[in-house]
Image (tube, rainbow, N blue to C red):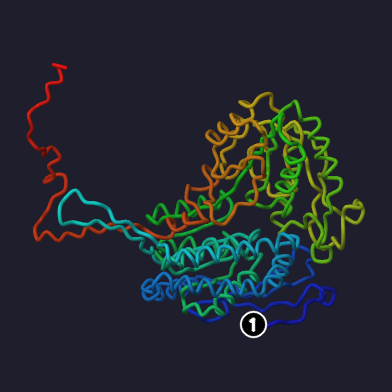
Protein backbone atom coordinates (compact mmCIF):
# COMPACT_ATOMS: atom_id res chain seq x y z
CA UNK A 1 0.00 0.00 0.00
CA UNK A 2 1.33 3.43 -1.00
CA UNK A 3 0.33 6.79 0.48
CA UNK A 4 1.17 10.37 -0.48
CA UNK A 5 0.54 13.72 1.22
CA UNK A 6 -2.86 15.26 0.58
CA UNK A 7 -3.58 18.87 -0.37
CA UNK A 8 -2.13 21.02 2.45
CA UNK A 9 -5.57 22.35 3.37
CA UNK A 10 -6.79 18.73 3.68
CA UNK A 11 -4.00 17.29 5.80
CA UNK A 12 -6.46 16.96 8.69
CA UNK A 13 -8.64 14.61 6.60
CA UNK A 14 -5.90 12.09 5.89
CA UNK A 15 -3.42 11.02 3.23
CA UNK A 16 -4.05 10.05 -0.39
CA UNK A 17 -4.08 6.33 -1.22
CA UNK A 18 -2.29 5.21 -4.37
CA UNK A 19 -4.38 2.26 -5.46
CA UNK A 20 -4.32 -0.54 -8.01
CA UNK A 21 -6.46 -3.10 -9.69
CA UNK A 22 -6.21 -6.59 -8.18
CA UNK A 23 -6.05 -9.29 -10.84
CA UNK A 24 -4.90 -12.86 -10.34
CA UNK A 25 -3.51 -12.02 -6.91
CA UNK A 26 -1.38 -9.12 -8.18
CA UNK A 27 -1.77 -5.38 -7.83
CA UNK A 28 -1.67 -4.00 -11.38
CA UNK A 29 -1.95 -0.75 -13.26
CA UNK A 30 -4.66 -0.37 -15.88
CA UNK A 31 -4.49 0.18 -19.62
CA UNK A 32 -5.83 3.73 -19.33
CA UNK A 33 -4.73 6.85 -17.39
CA UNK A 34 -5.49 7.02 -13.67
CA UNK A 35 -8.38 8.93 -12.14
CA UNK A 36 -8.73 10.73 -8.80
CA UNK A 37 -11.22 9.86 -6.08
CA UNK A 38 -12.23 13.30 -4.84
CA UNK A 39 -14.13 13.61 -1.59
CA UNK A 40 -17.68 15.00 -1.93
CA UNK A 41 -17.11 16.61 1.49
CA UNK A 42 -14.41 18.90 0.10
CA UNK A 43 -13.16 18.59 -3.47
CA UNK A 44 -9.64 19.55 -2.39
CA UNK A 45 -9.40 16.20 -0.57
CA UNK A 46 -7.99 13.58 -2.96
CA UNK A 47 -8.83 10.36 -1.16
CA UNK A 48 -7.17 8.13 -3.75
CA UNK A 49 -5.65 7.80 -7.20
CA UNK A 50 -6.59 4.68 -9.19
CA UNK A 51 -5.97 3.16 -12.62
CA UNK A 52 -8.76 3.07 -15.19
CA UNK A 53 -9.31 -0.33 -16.78
CA UNK A 54 -9.91 -1.16 -20.41
CA UNK A 55 -11.08 -4.18 -22.35
CA UNK A 56 -7.82 -6.12 -21.93
CA UNK A 57 -7.85 -5.61 -18.16
CA UNK A 58 -11.33 -7.11 -17.96
CA UNK A 59 -10.32 -10.12 -20.02
CA UNK A 60 -7.26 -10.67 -17.78
CA UNK A 61 -9.46 -10.53 -14.69
CA UNK A 62 -12.04 -12.91 -16.16
CA UNK A 63 -9.33 -15.39 -17.16
CA UNK A 64 -7.77 -15.21 -13.68
CA UNK A 65 -11.18 -15.88 -12.15
CA UNK A 66 -11.87 -18.79 -14.51
CA UNK A 67 -8.49 -20.36 -13.74
CA UNK A 68 -8.99 -19.94 -9.98
CA UNK A 69 -12.47 -21.47 -10.17
CA UNK A 70 -11.03 -24.84 -11.16
CA UNK A 71 -9.39 -25.26 -7.75
CA UNK A 72 -11.45 -22.96 -5.51
CA UNK A 73 -14.65 -24.92 -6.14
CA UNK A 74 -12.92 -28.03 -4.74
CA UNK A 75 -11.97 -26.34 -1.45
CA UNK A 76 -14.30 -27.61 1.31
CA UNK A 77 -16.97 -25.06 2.19
CA UNK A 78 -15.95 -24.79 5.89
CA UNK A 79 -12.41 -23.93 4.73
CA UNK A 80 -13.76 -21.30 2.36
CA UNK A 81 -15.69 -19.97 5.37
CA UNK A 82 -12.47 -19.77 7.36
CA UNK A 83 -11.07 -17.33 4.79
CA UNK A 84 -14.14 -15.14 5.37
CA UNK A 85 -13.49 -15.35 9.11
CA UNK A 86 -10.01 -13.94 8.59
CA UNK A 87 -11.41 -11.11 6.45
CA UNK A 88 -13.75 -10.36 9.36
CA UNK A 89 -10.85 -10.00 11.78
CA UNK A 90 -9.20 -7.39 9.58
CA UNK A 91 -12.42 -5.38 9.36
CA UNK A 92 -12.88 -5.57 13.14
CA UNK A 93 -9.31 -4.49 13.83
CA UNK A 94 -9.56 -1.49 11.49
CA UNK A 95 -13.18 -0.45 12.01
CA UNK A 96 -12.53 3.21 12.76
CA UNK A 97 -10.02 3.62 9.91
CA UNK A 98 -12.40 2.08 7.41
CA UNK A 99 -15.22 4.30 8.65
CA UNK A 100 -13.01 7.37 8.18
CA UNK A 101 -12.39 6.45 4.52
CA UNK A 102 -16.10 5.79 3.99
CA UNK A 103 -16.91 9.26 5.36
CA UNK A 104 -14.32 10.88 3.12
CA UNK A 105 -15.42 9.04 -0.03
CA UNK A 106 -19.21 9.11 0.46
CA UNK A 107 -19.87 12.10 2.72
CA UNK A 108 -21.95 10.09 5.19
CA UNK A 109 -21.45 11.01 8.87
CA UNK A 110 -19.10 8.86 10.99
CA UNK A 111 -22.00 7.31 12.93
CA UNK A 112 -23.43 5.89 9.71
CA UNK A 113 -19.99 4.91 8.42
CA UNK A 114 -19.25 2.97 11.60
CA UNK A 115 -22.64 1.30 11.28
CA UNK A 116 -21.76 0.23 7.74
CA UNK A 117 -18.49 -1.34 8.88
CA UNK A 118 -20.33 -3.16 11.67
CA UNK A 119 -22.85 -4.48 9.16
CA UNK A 120 -19.98 -5.79 7.02
CA UNK A 121 -18.52 -7.50 10.11
CA UNK A 122 -21.91 -9.06 10.88
CA UNK A 123 -22.12 -10.35 7.30
CA UNK A 124 -18.66 -11.90 7.58
CA UNK A 125 -19.63 -13.71 10.76
CA UNK A 126 -22.87 -14.96 9.21
CA UNK A 127 -21.34 -16.25 5.98
CA UNK A 128 -18.40 -17.84 7.73
CA UNK A 129 -20.87 -19.97 9.67
CA UNK A 130 -22.83 -20.76 6.50
CA UNK A 131 -19.76 -22.65 5.31
CA UNK A 132 -20.94 -25.46 7.59
CA UNK A 133 -24.55 -25.21 6.41
CA UNK A 134 -24.52 -25.46 2.61
CA UNK A 135 -27.20 -28.09 3.02
CA UNK A 136 -28.66 -30.32 0.36
CA UNK A 137 -31.49 -32.81 0.88
CA UNK A 138 -32.03 -36.55 0.88
CA UNK A 139 -35.35 -37.29 -0.82
CA UNK A 140 -37.31 -40.58 -0.65
CA UNK A 141 -37.73 -42.28 -4.03
CA UNK A 142 -40.90 -43.93 -5.29
CA UNK A 143 -38.77 -46.89 -6.41
CA UNK A 144 -36.82 -49.43 -4.31
CA UNK A 145 -33.01 -49.40 -4.04
CA UNK A 146 -32.85 -45.78 -5.10
CA UNK A 147 -31.85 -42.65 -3.15
CA UNK A 148 -32.30 -39.09 -4.38
CA UNK A 149 -29.96 -36.29 -3.26
CA UNK A 150 -29.71 -32.58 -4.00
CA UNK A 151 -26.51 -30.51 -3.86
CA UNK A 152 -25.71 -26.82 -4.12
CA UNK A 153 -23.11 -26.33 -6.87
CA UNK A 154 -21.22 -23.11 -7.71
CA UNK A 155 -22.13 -21.40 -10.96
CA UNK A 156 -18.65 -20.23 -12.02
CA UNK A 157 -17.29 -16.73 -12.59
CA UNK A 158 -19.58 -14.04 -11.17
CA UNK A 159 -19.49 -10.47 -12.43
CA UNK A 160 -20.33 -7.94 -9.72
CA UNK A 161 -21.02 -4.20 -10.10
CA UNK A 162 -21.73 -2.17 -6.95
CA UNK A 163 -22.73 1.46 -6.22
CA UNK A 164 -21.15 4.18 -4.13
CA UNK A 165 -23.60 4.90 -1.32
CA UNK A 166 -22.79 1.67 0.57
CA UNK A 167 -19.28 0.99 -0.73
CA UNK A 168 -18.42 -1.64 1.89
CA UNK A 169 -21.67 -3.46 2.68
CA UNK A 170 -23.08 -3.96 -0.83
CA UNK A 171 -19.87 -5.58 -2.15
CA UNK A 172 -19.65 -7.78 0.95
CA UNK A 173 -23.33 -8.75 0.47
CA UNK A 174 -22.47 -10.06 -2.99
CA UNK A 175 -18.87 -11.23 -2.86
CA UNK A 176 -18.94 -13.24 0.38
CA UNK A 177 -21.82 -15.59 -0.50
CA UNK A 178 -20.39 -15.93 -4.01
CA UNK A 179 -16.97 -17.13 -2.88
CA UNK A 180 -18.39 -19.14 0.03
CA UNK A 181 -20.35 -21.19 -2.52
CA UNK A 182 -17.19 -21.89 -4.52
CA UNK A 183 -17.49 -19.22 -7.21
CA UNK A 184 -14.89 -16.68 -8.23
CA UNK A 185 -15.54 -12.98 -8.79
CA UNK A 186 -14.71 -10.10 -11.11
CA UNK A 187 -15.82 -6.95 -9.29
CA UNK A 188 -16.12 -3.39 -10.55
CA UNK A 189 -16.73 -1.01 -7.65
CA UNK A 190 -18.09 2.48 -8.07
CA UNK A 191 -15.56 4.93 -9.45
CA UNK A 192 -16.64 7.31 -6.66
CA UNK A 193 -15.45 4.93 -3.91
CA UNK A 194 -12.38 3.03 -5.17
CA UNK A 195 -10.49 3.49 -1.89
CA UNK A 196 -13.02 1.48 0.11
CA UNK A 197 -12.91 -1.21 -2.58
CA UNK A 198 -9.12 -1.27 -2.48
CA UNK A 199 -9.16 -1.73 1.29
CA UNK A 200 -11.63 -4.61 0.94
CA UNK A 201 -9.11 -6.18 -1.44
CA UNK A 202 -6.31 -5.58 1.06
CA UNK A 203 -8.39 -7.26 3.78
CA UNK A 204 -8.75 -10.26 1.47
CA UNK A 205 -5.00 -10.28 0.89
CA UNK A 206 -4.42 -10.21 4.65
CA UNK A 207 -6.77 -13.20 4.92
CA UNK A 208 -4.67 -15.15 2.41
CA UNK A 209 -7.46 -15.53 -0.14
CA UNK A 210 -6.03 -17.57 -3.06
CA UNK A 211 -5.00 -15.74 -6.21
CA UNK A 212 -7.79 -15.00 -8.64
CA UNK A 213 -10.71 -15.85 -6.37
CA UNK A 214 -11.64 -12.16 -6.23
CA UNK A 215 -10.45 -9.70 -8.88
CA UNK A 216 -11.03 -5.93 -8.65
CA UNK A 217 -11.15 -3.81 -11.80
CA UNK A 218 -11.59 -0.06 -11.54
CA UNK A 219 -13.31 2.14 -14.05
CA UNK A 220 -16.01 4.64 -14.84
CA UNK A 221 -19.66 3.92 -15.54
CA UNK A 222 -21.97 2.74 -18.28
CA UNK A 223 -20.43 4.66 -21.19
CA UNK A 224 -16.81 3.95 -20.17
CA UNK A 225 -15.60 0.70 -18.57
CA UNK A 226 -19.21 -0.36 -18.06
CA UNK A 227 -19.57 -0.99 -21.80
CA UNK A 228 -16.77 -3.56 -21.61
CA UNK A 229 -18.63 -5.37 -18.83
CA UNK A 230 -21.74 -5.57 -21.00
CA UNK A 231 -19.63 -6.85 -23.87
CA UNK A 232 -18.05 -9.36 -21.50
CA UNK A 233 -21.46 -10.92 -20.93
CA UNK A 234 -21.77 -11.46 -24.68
CA UNK A 235 -18.28 -12.99 -24.69
CA UNK A 236 -19.39 -15.53 -22.04
CA UNK A 237 -16.81 -14.26 -19.54
CA UNK A 238 -19.37 -14.70 -16.73
CA UNK A 239 -21.73 -17.45 -15.67
CA UNK A 240 -23.85 -15.06 -13.58
CA UNK A 241 -23.97 -11.33 -13.06
CA UNK A 242 -24.92 -9.15 -10.10
CA UNK A 243 -25.72 -5.47 -10.55
CA UNK A 244 -26.77 -2.99 -7.86
CA UNK A 245 -27.74 0.47 -9.07
CA UNK A 246 -30.33 2.36 -11.05
CA UNK A 247 -33.29 0.69 -12.73
CA UNK A 248 -32.34 2.20 -16.09
CA UNK A 249 -28.82 0.70 -16.11
CA UNK A 250 -30.06 -2.51 -14.51
CA UNK A 251 -32.31 -3.06 -17.51
CA UNK A 252 -29.25 -3.11 -19.78
CA UNK A 253 -27.52 -5.77 -17.69
CA UNK A 254 -30.73 -7.79 -17.36
CA UNK A 255 -31.37 -7.70 -21.10
CA UNK A 256 -27.80 -8.72 -21.91
CA UNK A 257 -27.90 -11.56 -19.39
CA UNK A 258 -31.24 -12.76 -20.73
CA UNK A 259 -29.91 -12.79 -24.28
CA UNK A 260 -27.02 -15.00 -23.15
CA UNK A 261 -29.10 -17.20 -20.82
CA UNK A 262 -27.09 -16.00 -17.81
CA UNK A 263 -28.87 -15.57 -14.49
CA UNK A 264 -28.82 -11.90 -13.37
CA UNK A 265 -29.12 -10.67 -9.80
CA UNK A 266 -30.56 -7.14 -9.92
CA UNK A 267 -31.00 -4.77 -6.97
CA UNK A 268 -32.34 -1.54 -8.43
CA UNK A 269 -34.17 1.70 -7.61
CA UNK A 270 -37.01 2.39 -5.20
CA UNK A 271 -39.78 4.79 -4.23
CA UNK A 272 -40.49 3.70 -0.69
CA UNK A 273 -43.83 4.54 0.96
CA UNK A 274 -44.55 5.08 4.65
CA UNK A 275 -48.20 5.06 5.77
CA UNK A 276 -49.12 6.97 8.96
CA UNK A 277 -52.61 6.23 10.30
CA UNK A 278 -54.61 8.29 12.87
CA UNK A 279 -53.77 5.93 15.75
CA UNK A 280 -50.03 6.04 15.11
CA UNK A 281 -47.49 7.20 17.66
CA UNK A 282 -46.61 10.41 15.80
CA UNK A 283 -43.31 10.97 17.59
CA UNK A 284 -42.22 7.46 16.64
CA UNK A 285 -43.37 8.03 13.06
CA UNK A 286 -41.53 11.37 12.98
CA UNK A 287 -38.24 9.77 14.02
CA UNK A 288 -38.64 7.12 11.32
CA UNK A 289 -39.52 9.70 8.69
CA UNK A 290 -36.56 11.96 9.51
CA UNK A 291 -33.92 9.25 9.44
CA UNK A 292 -35.56 7.43 6.55
CA UNK A 293 -35.78 10.52 4.35
CA UNK A 294 -32.60 12.40 5.23
CA UNK A 295 -29.95 9.93 6.47
CA UNK A 296 -27.09 9.67 3.97
CA UNK A 297 -28.59 12.83 2.42
CA UNK A 298 -31.49 10.72 1.18
CA UNK A 299 -29.28 8.72 -1.19
CA UNK A 300 -30.12 5.22 0.08
CA UNK A 301 -32.19 2.84 -2.00
CA UNK A 302 -34.18 2.29 1.21
CA UNK A 303 -34.85 6.01 1.81
CA UNK A 304 -38.39 7.16 2.57
CA UNK A 305 -39.90 8.85 -0.50
CA UNK A 306 -43.68 9.15 -0.06
CA UNK A 307 -45.10 9.92 3.39
CA UNK A 308 -48.74 8.86 3.09
CA UNK A 309 -50.52 10.47 6.05
CA UNK A 310 -54.17 10.19 7.06
CA UNK A 311 -55.85 13.61 6.85
CA UNK A 312 -56.91 13.45 10.53
CA UNK A 313 -53.26 13.72 11.64
CA UNK A 314 -51.70 15.42 8.61
CA UNK A 315 -51.78 18.89 10.16
CA UNK A 316 -50.05 17.99 13.40
CA UNK A 317 -47.59 15.63 11.71
CA UNK A 318 -46.62 18.24 9.13
CA UNK A 319 -46.04 20.76 11.92
CA UNK A 320 -43.84 18.30 13.82
CA UNK A 321 -41.88 17.38 10.68
CA UNK A 322 -41.09 20.96 9.69
CA UNK A 323 -40.14 21.89 13.27
CA UNK A 324 -37.75 18.93 13.46
CA UNK A 325 -36.14 19.79 10.12
CA UNK A 326 -35.44 23.30 11.39
CA UNK A 327 -33.22 21.70 14.04
CA UNK A 328 -31.36 19.18 11.85
CA UNK A 329 -27.59 19.77 11.89
CA UNK A 330 -26.27 19.57 8.31
CA UNK A 331 -22.78 20.05 6.98
CA UNK A 332 -19.19 18.82 6.87
CA UNK A 333 -19.01 15.31 8.42
CA UNK A 334 -15.20 15.26 8.58
CA UNK A 335 -14.85 18.32 10.81
CA UNK A 336 -18.29 18.02 12.44
CA UNK A 337 -19.13 14.34 12.97
CA UNK A 338 -22.39 15.25 14.73
CA UNK A 339 -24.14 16.36 11.49
CA UNK A 340 -27.31 14.49 10.51
CA UNK A 341 -26.29 14.38 6.87
CA UNK A 342 -23.54 15.64 4.60
CA UNK A 343 -23.11 16.34 0.88
CA UNK A 344 -24.38 14.73 -2.31
CA UNK A 345 -21.96 12.04 -3.40
CA UNK A 346 -21.27 13.22 -6.96
CA UNK A 347 -21.91 16.00 -9.45
CA UNK A 348 -24.23 13.68 -11.40
CA UNK A 349 -26.32 13.00 -8.31
CA UNK A 350 -26.32 16.71 -7.52
CA UNK A 351 -27.57 17.66 -10.98
CA UNK A 352 -30.35 15.06 -10.90
CA UNK A 353 -31.46 16.26 -7.48
CA UNK A 354 -31.49 19.93 -8.52
CA UNK A 355 -33.63 19.05 -11.55
CA UNK A 356 -36.37 17.66 -9.32
CA UNK A 357 -37.08 21.13 -7.89
CA UNK A 358 -38.51 22.26 -11.22
CA UNK A 359 -40.24 18.90 -11.75
CA UNK A 360 -42.09 19.28 -8.46
CA UNK A 361 -43.21 22.80 -9.27
CA UNK A 362 -44.44 21.73 -12.71
CA UNK A 363 -46.35 18.86 -11.05
CA UNK A 364 -48.21 21.41 -8.94
CA UNK A 365 -46.79 20.27 -5.60
CA UNK A 366 -46.11 22.81 -2.86
CA UNK A 367 -42.52 23.14 -1.61
CA UNK A 368 -42.74 23.76 2.14
CA UNK A 369 -39.01 23.97 2.75
CA UNK A 370 -35.77 23.57 0.80
CA UNK A 371 -35.24 24.03 -2.90
CA UNK A 372 -31.66 25.32 -2.92
CA UNK A 373 -28.05 24.41 -2.26
CA UNK A 374 -26.52 25.67 0.96
CA UNK A 375 -24.03 28.49 0.32
CA UNK A 376 -22.10 31.02 2.36
CA UNK A 377 -24.91 33.50 1.69
CA UNK A 378 -27.96 31.43 2.69
CA UNK A 379 -26.54 29.13 5.37
CA UNK A 380 -28.09 29.30 8.82
CA UNK A 381 -27.27 28.00 12.29
CA UNK A 382 -28.00 24.40 11.25
CA UNK A 383 -25.10 24.32 8.80
CA UNK A 384 -21.78 23.29 10.32
CA UNK A 385 -18.25 23.48 8.93
CA UNK A 386 -16.76 24.28 5.54
CA UNK A 387 -19.28 23.58 2.75
CA UNK A 388 -17.98 25.69 -0.14
CA UNK A 389 -16.18 22.76 -1.83
CA UNK A 390 -19.09 20.31 -1.80
CA UNK A 391 -22.75 20.03 -2.82
CA UNK A 392 -24.74 20.42 0.41
CA UNK A 393 -28.49 20.46 -0.18
CA UNK A 394 -31.28 21.95 1.86
CA UNK A 395 -33.81 19.35 3.07
CA UNK A 396 -36.93 19.44 0.89
CA UNK A 397 -40.52 18.71 1.89
CA UNK A 398 -43.18 18.67 -0.83
CA UNK A 399 -46.85 18.96 0.12
CA UNK A 400 -50.08 18.02 -1.66
CA UNK A 401 -48.37 15.31 -3.68
CA UNK A 402 -50.60 12.81 -5.51
CA UNK A 403 -49.89 9.62 -7.48
CA UNK A 404 -50.28 11.38 -10.81
CA UNK A 405 -47.20 13.52 -10.18
CA UNK A 406 -43.75 12.62 -11.47
CA UNK A 407 -42.13 13.29 -8.11
CA UNK A 408 -44.48 10.69 -6.59
CA UNK A 409 -43.65 8.08 -9.22
CA UNK A 410 -39.91 8.25 -9.89
CA UNK A 411 -36.88 7.73 -7.68
CA UNK A 412 -35.16 10.94 -6.55
CA UNK A 413 -31.93 10.38 -4.67
CA UNK A 414 -31.36 13.24 -2.26
CA UNK A 415 -32.75 14.86 0.91
CA UNK A 416 -36.38 15.19 -0.18
CA UNK A 417 -39.70 13.69 0.88
CA UNK A 418 -43.33 13.97 -0.29
CA UNK A 419 -46.39 14.51 1.92
CA UNK A 420 -49.49 12.78 0.56
CA UNK A 421 -52.86 13.14 2.32
CA UNK A 422 -55.36 10.24 2.27
CA UNK A 423 -58.88 9.75 3.58
CA UNK A 424 -58.81 6.07 4.56
CA UNK A 425 -56.67 2.98 5.01
CA UNK A 426 -57.87 1.70 1.62
CA UNK A 427 -56.69 4.86 -0.09
CA UNK A 428 -53.39 4.72 1.82
CA UNK A 429 -52.77 1.19 0.58
CA UNK A 430 -53.66 2.24 -2.95
CA UNK A 431 -51.14 5.09 -2.76
CA UNK A 432 -48.47 2.82 -1.26
CA UNK A 433 -48.86 0.44 -4.20
CA UNK A 434 -49.12 3.31 -6.67
CA UNK A 435 -45.59 3.22 -8.13
CA UNK A 436 -43.82 0.64 -10.33
CA UNK A 437 -41.20 0.06 -7.62
CA UNK A 438 -41.41 -2.43 -4.77
CA UNK A 439 -38.43 -2.43 -2.41
CA UNK A 440 -39.30 -1.15 1.09
CA UNK A 441 -42.50 -0.09 2.81
CA UNK A 442 -43.70 0.80 6.29
CA UNK A 443 -46.88 1.50 8.25
CA UNK A 444 -47.39 3.22 11.60
CA UNK A 445 -50.54 2.05 13.37
CA UNK A 446 -51.72 0.03 16.36
CA UNK A 447 -54.62 -1.54 14.44
CA UNK A 448 -53.85 -5.25 13.97
CA UNK A 449 -56.36 -5.61 11.14
CA UNK A 450 -54.67 -2.81 9.17
CA UNK A 451 -51.24 -4.27 9.93
CA UNK A 452 -52.22 -7.72 8.71
CA UNK A 453 -53.86 -6.38 5.55
CA UNK A 454 -50.95 -4.06 4.78
CA UNK A 455 -48.35 -6.81 5.09
CA UNK A 456 -50.47 -9.10 2.92
CA UNK A 457 -51.29 -6.64 0.13
CA UNK A 458 -48.31 -4.29 -0.09
CA UNK A 459 -46.19 -4.77 -3.21
CA UNK A 460 -42.74 -4.72 -1.61
CA UNK A 461 -39.91 -7.03 -0.69
CA UNK A 462 -39.53 -5.56 2.80
CA UNK A 463 -42.17 -4.21 5.17
CA UNK A 464 -41.77 -2.57 8.57
CA UNK A 465 -44.45 -2.18 11.23
CA UNK A 466 -44.03 0.95 13.37
CA UNK A 467 -40.49 1.37 12.07
CA UNK A 468 -38.86 3.07 9.10
CA UNK A 469 -37.94 1.67 5.70
CA UNK A 470 -34.21 1.65 6.51
CA UNK A 471 -32.18 -0.70 8.66
CA UNK A 472 -32.54 -4.25 7.31
CA UNK A 473 -30.60 -6.87 9.30
CA UNK A 474 -27.97 -9.08 7.68
CA UNK A 475 -29.69 -12.43 8.27
CA UNK A 476 -32.99 -11.58 6.57
CA UNK A 477 -33.67 -11.55 2.80
CA UNK A 478 -33.24 -8.19 1.08
CA UNK A 479 -34.56 -7.36 -2.37
CA UNK A 480 -37.39 -5.85 -4.34
CA UNK A 481 -40.13 -6.38 -6.88
CA UNK A 482 -41.12 -4.61 -10.10
CA UNK A 483 -38.70 -1.84 -10.98
CA UNK A 484 -36.76 -2.53 -7.75
CA UNK A 485 -35.34 -5.88 -8.83
CA UNK A 486 -35.91 -9.21 -10.51
CA UNK A 487 -37.02 -11.14 -7.43
CA UNK A 488 -33.62 -12.43 -6.33
CA UNK A 489 -32.56 -11.83 -2.74
CA UNK A 490 -29.36 -10.98 -0.92
CA UNK A 491 -28.64 -11.30 2.78
CA UNK A 492 -29.09 -14.36 4.97
CA UNK A 493 -29.22 -17.88 3.58
CA UNK A 494 -31.39 -16.65 0.68
CA UNK A 495 -28.32 -15.21 -1.05
CA UNK A 496 -27.00 -18.75 -1.49
CA UNK A 497 -29.77 -19.35 -4.06
CA UNK A 498 -28.32 -16.52 -6.18
CA UNK A 499 -24.82 -17.96 -6.28
CA UNK A 500 -25.54 -21.68 -6.63
CA UNK A 501 -27.54 -23.98 -8.84
CA UNK A 502 -29.25 -27.11 -7.59
CA UNK A 503 -28.03 -30.49 -8.79
CA UNK A 504 -30.29 -33.51 -8.30
CA UNK A 505 -28.56 -36.90 -8.08
CA UNK A 506 -30.35 -40.20 -8.70
CA UNK A 507 -28.37 -42.98 -6.98
CA UNK A 508 -29.81 -46.35 -8.07
CA UNK A 509 -28.35 -49.61 -6.66
CA UNK A 510 -30.98 -52.01 -8.06
CA UNK A 511 -28.69 -53.30 -10.83
CA UNK A 512 -31.45 -52.79 -13.40
CA UNK A 513 -33.24 -50.00 -15.21
CA UNK A 514 -36.05 -48.63 -13.04
CA UNK A 515 -38.53 -46.18 -14.54
CA UNK A 516 -40.33 -43.74 -12.30
CA UNK A 517 -44.03 -43.21 -13.03
CA UNK A 518 -44.03 -46.22 -15.40
CA UNK A 519 -43.01 -49.01 -12.99
CA UNK A 520 -44.56 -47.47 -9.90
CA UNK A 521 -47.79 -49.24 -8.87
CA UNK A 522 -49.67 -46.81 -6.64
CA UNK A 523 -52.77 -49.02 -6.78
CA UNK A 524 -51.15 -52.09 -5.13
CA UNK A 525 -53.17 -53.09 -2.04
CA UNK A 526 -53.92 -56.13 0.14
CA UNK A 527 -57.19 -58.11 -0.25
CA UNK A 528 -59.74 -58.19 2.61
CA UNK A 529 -63.44 -58.94 2.95
CA UNK A 530 -65.26 -55.71 2.15
CA UNK A 531 -66.83 -53.84 5.04
CA UNK A 532 -70.64 -53.73 4.69
CA UNK A 533 -71.08 -50.05 5.63
CA UNK A 534 -74.67 -49.98 4.31
CA UNK A 535 -75.83 -52.43 6.98
CA UNK A 536 -74.88 -50.17 9.90
Q: How crowded is mark 1: few (under 14 residues within 10 Å), some or many (20 or more)?
A: few
32 relative to 409, above or below = below
Residue at (53% x, 49% y) in the render: 479
466 and 206: which is toward the camera: 466
Question: Looking at the image, how many numbered discs can be counted on the residues?
Answer: 1
Image quarter of the C terminus: top left
Give residue 466's position: percent from left, percent from top: 66, 40
Residue 233 x %, y %: 43, 61
SS label for mark 1: loop
Placement of the N terminus among the 4 image quadrants:
bottom right
Q: Where is residue 298 in the image (x, y as percent from the top left)?
A: 71, 50
Q: In which quarter of the image is residue 431?
A: top right
Identity of the residue furthest to the top in this view: 535
Q: Residue at x 49, y 52 (%)?
A: 489
User: In front here: 273 or 28?
Assistant: 273
Residue receiving disc 1: 1
* Depth check, front residue: 147 or 207: 147
Q: Is residue 157 left or right of residue 94?
A: left
Image coords of residue 142 (percent x, y): 19, 48
Amino acid sequence: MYLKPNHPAMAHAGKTIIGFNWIGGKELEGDLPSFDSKSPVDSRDTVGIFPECGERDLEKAAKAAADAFKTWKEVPAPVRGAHIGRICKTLEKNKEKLAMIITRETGKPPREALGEVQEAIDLCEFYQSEGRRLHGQTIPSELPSRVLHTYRRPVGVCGVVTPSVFPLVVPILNILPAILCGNTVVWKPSSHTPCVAYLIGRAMMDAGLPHGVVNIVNGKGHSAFGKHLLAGIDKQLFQMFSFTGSTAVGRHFGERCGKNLITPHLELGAKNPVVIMPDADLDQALAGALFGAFATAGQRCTSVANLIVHREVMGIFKEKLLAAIEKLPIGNPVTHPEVFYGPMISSRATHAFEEHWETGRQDGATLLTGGARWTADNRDMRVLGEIAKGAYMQPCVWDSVTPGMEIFQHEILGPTVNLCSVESFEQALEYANGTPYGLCSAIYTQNRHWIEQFTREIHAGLTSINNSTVGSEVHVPFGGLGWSGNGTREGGAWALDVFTHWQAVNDDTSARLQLAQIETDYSKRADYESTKWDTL
